[in-house]
Image: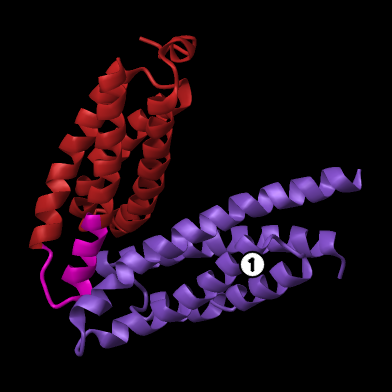
Amino acid sequence: MRSISYAYAISAWLFFAGVVYQVFLAGIGLLGGGDMTAHMGFGYLLPLVAILLFLVGWAAQPDRRTFRLTLLLMVLTLIQPNLPLLRDVSPALAALHPVNALAIFWLALTVARGATTLVGRPTVARDEVQVPR
Amino acid sequence: MSVHQARTLYLAVIWLFVACLVVQVFLVGLDIFGDAIDPTTHRTWAYIYGWLTPILVFLGTIGRLPLSMRLGTVALLFLFAMQTLLPSLRDVLPVVAAAHALNALLIFWLAMVLARRARDAAASQQSAGA
């Protein structure tokens, strides 16, 4: 169980680093003389990592709050690449793309910190707070 | 102004700042995805609520907040000032200008940390007074 906790913490911090990198790529595309190709390409990879993080989180059995936040993180990350596609139908909804990015950033950090706490917690104490299945 | 009043006001102003940041990011979205009434709204809005940062420094000092919080508030003011300058570097130093988006994340993170700590500081002041 200890190795899965480590895997959860590592993947959560990797995901967080990915979010920060993705925002940097957006900056490069908008102000750094580049285009949005790298940002868009990486943006399709992040939801896959979010799904993986959720599955690892499921196996690691964190506390209920961290598990729910991991689920929410996955949902918001899955929505994120679809928001810009709405620009012709509803520009206001598409404009939520950067706002959703802020939410993903904050959630990713919260989940990563929660997952790190899990690594240091004894297995017995963790088992007292079971994740709903 | 008493310490308690300053801490309560700091708490209100920092959350107002966070709300303004979220609006700011939404305005960026409108700029990029097309429905912006005026593409300069994003910039103008920053100049309007940017005044909250020196007010926060003042309230943090009057409210005798912990040193780490006061330094954090000064850092927020500094990062916000930097933020308004970064886009102007796009022709000279594009990679530095690209840090505009990353700096926005940093400002958001710092504001959220300060807001949560201000809530704790206001609560401890209240319980000490009771």
User: Quadrant where the N terminus of chain B lies?
Assistant: bottom right
Q: Nearer the viewer, residue B77 or A102?
A: B77
Image coordinates for residue B20, horizontal then vertical, percent: 52, 65
Q: Is residue B53 visible?
A: yes
Q: Is residue B80 above or below residue A111?
A: below
Residue carrying label 1: B70
Q: Is residue B43 visible?
A: no
Question: Numbered disc 1: what chain?
Answer: B
Of the residues shown, which amino acid type is indicated by label 1? Arg
Name the residue located 45 percent from the left edge and 15 percent from the top edge: A126
Name the residue located 40 percent from the left edge and 77 percent from the top edge: B83
A73 part of magenta stretch:
no
Query: Left or right: where does residue A46 sit relative to residue A116?
Result: left
Q: Nearer the viewer, residue B33 or A128?
A: A128
From which residue to which does the magenta span run?
A21-36
Chain A's colour? red
Query: Left or right: where does residue B128 sit relative to residue A99?
Result: right
Q: Quadrant of residue B58?
A: bottom right
Q: Is residue A4 above or below residue B101?
A: above
A32 part of magenta stretch:
yes
Name the residue located 62 percent from the left edge and 61 percent from the top edge: B69
Outermost residue, right direction?
Answer: B130
